[in-house]
């Protein structure tokens, strides 16, 4: 049973690392949003793995994961809407061009 937990945690760590690499190195805002979603899915995988193979198995992690998926969907919708508005105004999806948005 612990080998399955280790497998899930290894997969989640790999997914989170790929997402973190995408956020830190890519210039396109679409790729950054996709990388953030990949990181959130890695966290959801951890929640589900610990709820199934943890010390006290229960459905709490799975329910919390569903709430996280709902928040991630709302975040993606708002992020894409903001990105479309910025693209229409500036004509580019390059995150380096949006330095005026910093306060």
Image (cartoon, helix red, strand yellow):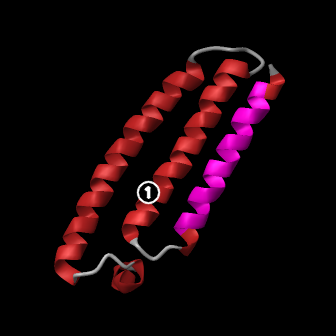
Residue drawn 61% across the image and 31% down it: 47
- Look at the image and give the residue range highlighted in magenta: 4-23
Say whether residue 6 is magenta.
Answer: yes
Classify residue 69 as left or right of residue 12.
Answer: left
Could you tell me what secondary structure mostly forms the magenta stretch? helix
Q: From the image, which quarter does the N terminus lie in?
A: top right
Residue 53 spot, x, y in % from top left: 72, 20
Look at the numbered disc 1 and give the secondary structure of its residue.
helix
Residue 27 spot, x, y in % from top left: 45, 77
Classify residue 84 as left or right of residue 64.
Answer: left
The correct choice, above or below, for 23 with respect to 44 in the image is below
Disc 1 crowd, CA 10 A, few/some/many (<14, 14-19, 20+): some
Residue 38 spot, x, y in % from top left: 51, 50
In the displayed image of the protein, which residue is found farthest to the right? Answer: 2
The correct choice, above or below, for 15 with respect to 96 in the image is above
Give the residue number, with chain letter if any, for mark 1: 34
């Amino acid at each position: 049973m612990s080998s399955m937990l280790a497998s899930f945690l290894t997969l989640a760590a790999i997914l989170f690392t790929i997402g973190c690499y995408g956020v830190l190195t890519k210039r396109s805002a679409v790729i950054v949003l996709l990388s953030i979603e990949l990181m959130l899915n890695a966290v959801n995988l951890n929640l589900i793995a610990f709820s199934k193979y943890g010390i006290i198995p229960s459905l709490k992690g799975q329910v919390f994961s569903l709430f996280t998926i709902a928040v991630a969907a709302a975040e993606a919708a708002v992020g894409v809407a903001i990105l479309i508005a910025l693209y229409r105004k500036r004509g580019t999806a390059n995150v380096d061009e949006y330095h005026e948005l910093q306060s």
